[in-house]
Amino acid sequence: MTTDIRSAALACRDAATTIAGLSAARKRDLLIAMAGQVDANAALILAANELDMAQAIHRGIGAAMLDRLRLDARRIAGIARSLMEVADLPDPVGQVTRRDTLPNGVVVERVRVPLGVIAMIYEARPNVTVDAAALCLKAGNGVILRGGSEAIHSNRALAGLLQQALRDAGLPPAAVTLVEDLRRETMLELLQLTDIVDLAIPRGGEGLIRFVAEHARVPVIKHYKGVCHLYVDKAANLGVALDLLIDGKVSRPSACNALETLLVHKDIADAFLPRAAAALAACKVELRGCERTCALLGNIAAASEEDYAAEYLDLIIAIRIVDDLDAAIAHIRRFGSDHTEVIASEDEASAQQFIAALRSAVVMVNTSSRFSDGGELGLGAEIGISTTRLHAYGPMGIDALTIERYVLRGHGQVRHRLSPATLNPNS
């Protein structure tokens, strides 16, 4: 095995110590400078992205992956804006989340501190390079970025700009380390560095996440696939339900918070599904339905078990008519990925039952699944949406990149005061 990745990780760990000691104001200034670098070098970023896009198209990469890979002026402006938004967030480091005074007068505090070194392993989203770096730095961490080969030129350009901002601020550029050796063996070695890497976060397709989870010795928080459901209850406002469906499926089908399955109560299927099918067809969405759905709509493909478990990331949706709320919940428990679930219903009891019965990271009532996003939830950028029940669950912002430790403050208290005879039994 090569030692290069270990050397790079050690440099990142040393840099992380420096970042952990920065004041809130200095971290804010650093992220603002990074936003300035992105803004000022949009042409450089676009040129790099064009190389990635050309190679991806030549390799026959699918439309969903191409959409994730593509950058344009609007998306680059969004990357810069996300840096500014993270810069303006309250600094979590040093935040006291709990303070108690014991009967003996000792003050017990729980205080947020940085995690240390975070390995971010992801695929074809160049924006993740910047989002991950911004959040990790804001939380006082170093970050090792291992993107996919599809985005290597874009990632190299973006990481280089972030490192330049670090240099300009007199800070070690290794705080943002980009892994350019994309061999699988190098990633395997990175995932074994338990003495250096404090957390790995894989973000991408199911294959990548399974590989990381199965081979890592460092702790892993999984950003697993998003098999997101919309259940239209018999008490739904059908206009609202239709808006949720179209926004959730069509606005960005390649996103992990896009809808993949529509569940409809049998009592309103006749009223809702033909209307929904027409709206989806107008948006060029392919429909795949259960037997009852096919009988009602006609001329659509039959849905298989694999369809109900699929994260399409494309203009395809699976549909099932269910007998009641309990059947909808049972379907989601069987096929869901613990990402995001939505109910359209004007009945508060049904909505509450839906919330209580499901353990997904985000559960929504009469709200689009597309709001399952760190930026939309006020976290600034997100480093991922955790579907692993560890210290973070759901969209992960800067707080999720810290841990809480105990700090005790006293004035000489001891647990047991020993007598002189106990200290010197021969006296």
Image: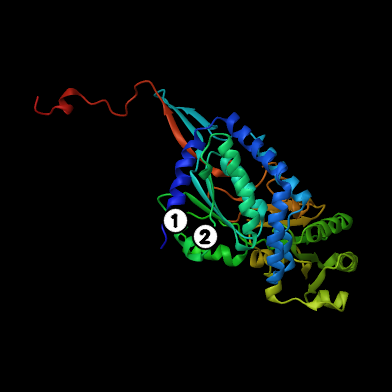
The quarter of the picture where the C terminus appears is top left
Residue 326 shows in this picture = no
Mark 2 — residue? 181
Q: Residue furthest left?
A: 426
Measured along the vertical axis of the image, is residue 6 above or below residue 307? above
Mark 1 — residue? 4
* Image location of residue 359, percent across then percent down: 63, 56
Measured along the vertical axis of the image, is residue 97 above or below residue 245? above
Looking at the rendering, which quadrant does residue 223 occupy?
A: bottom right
Which label's residue is closer to the chain start, 2 or 1? 1
Looking at the rendering, which quadrant does residue 95 occupy?
A: top right
- Residue for point 46% across, 44% down: 13
Left or right relative to 400: residue 251:
right
Residue 55 shows in this picture = yes
The quarter of the picture where the N terminus appears is bottom left
Left or right relative to 295: residue 303:
left
* Image location of residue 336, percent across then percent down: 66, 64
Q: Marks 2 and 1: CB-CB under 8 Å?
A: yes
- Residue for point 64% across, 51% down: 157
Residue type, mark 2 in image: Asp
- Residue for point 60% across, 29% down: 25
Q: Secondary structure at mark 2?
A: loop
Residue type, mark 1 in image: Asp
Q: Secondary structure at mark 1?
A: helix
